[in-house]
Image (spheres, grey):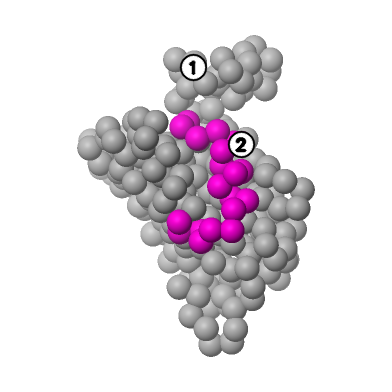
Amino acid sequence: MKGQFLTDRGKVRNYNEDAGGVFYNSFRQLLAIIADGMGGHQAGDVASQMAISLIEEKWKKSNELYSAEEAEQWISQAIIEINESIYAHALANSEYEGMGTTVVVTICTEEFITISHIGDSRCYLYSESGFNQMTEDHSLVNELVRSGQISKDDAEQHPRKNVLLRALGTEENAIAETQSVWWKHGDRVLLCSDGLTNKVSDEELASFLTTDSDINEIGKQMVELANERGGEDNISLLIVWHDSTLKEGENPC
């Protein structure tokens, strides 16, 4: 498995509140994560970086996960602990009051992937069944779409498009959605913040993922397109390609 993370400040923002990374435990299992921070006075980048650092530290100490059930338990506990840490940090530091972050995280083994998310950062999977969005945005407009009050087209221009219903670190308890699916050689996972999905359609994302180009080059092209269309937000994405099993002793990084 290969993973590539890219992030860009965009054309408008003065700083980047997104964070992410690709990490391996000692059993060569991969964890991919993207976090899109929120909060005034650059508190958003504190929240997102805390989420990344905490899960990286925890993952590198983890045991090998043999089943989807184990992976789901591990990721659920990790999110609980990270939420508690961010929430406590905000309470202890008035300048970070109200800070939080979205998070989308995927554990990738040879047989399955486990996906968990809070907020509107997304996970997509490209496989033999096509290109599918695996997560549902925890946002006001998505709930309006789901309930039939507005159309998907209306949602794109809705004035409260950026209002989240869930985030990591903003409340004492965080509720993430977690699922596991099988995947195989040749499949690709895309994690991304809304800085990408607000500018690039699902159809366009699919066209990028179905090419034979290097995943780093694919990611750069996605970022460039989002910036060409305004780049009002930070843009982050992460691609994991199930190419082959690592050979014994090979460095995955």
The image shows residue 118, relative to residue 153, as above or below, that is below
Tell me which segment is drawn in magenta.
198-217
Task: Using the image as rendered, state which of residue 217 and residue 161 is in the foreground.
Answer: 217
Camera-near label (1 vs 2) is: 2
Q: Secondary structure at mark 2?
A: helix
Residue 248 in the image, given as x and y percentages of width and height: 59, 87
Q: Is residue 212 magenta?
A: yes
**Amino acid type assigned to the residue bearing label 2 in the image:** Glu
Badge 2, how many Cα within 10 Å: few under 14, some, many 20+? Answer: few
The N terminus - image quarter:
bottom right
The image shows residue 27, relative to residue 17, as above or below, that is below
Judged left or right of residue 243, residue 93 is left
Residue 132 in the image, given as x and y percentages of width and height: 68, 42
Task: Using the image as rendered, state which of residue 44 and residue 213 is in the foreground.
Answer: 213
Residue sitting at x 72%, y 59%: 183
Residue sitting at x 63%, y 64%: 242
Which residue is tagged 2? 203
Q: Report the residue that reaches farthest toward the front.
A: 212
Which residue is tagged 1? 157
Residue sitting at x 70%, y 66%: 185
Measure how far apart labels 1 and 2 are at the Cα level.
19 Å
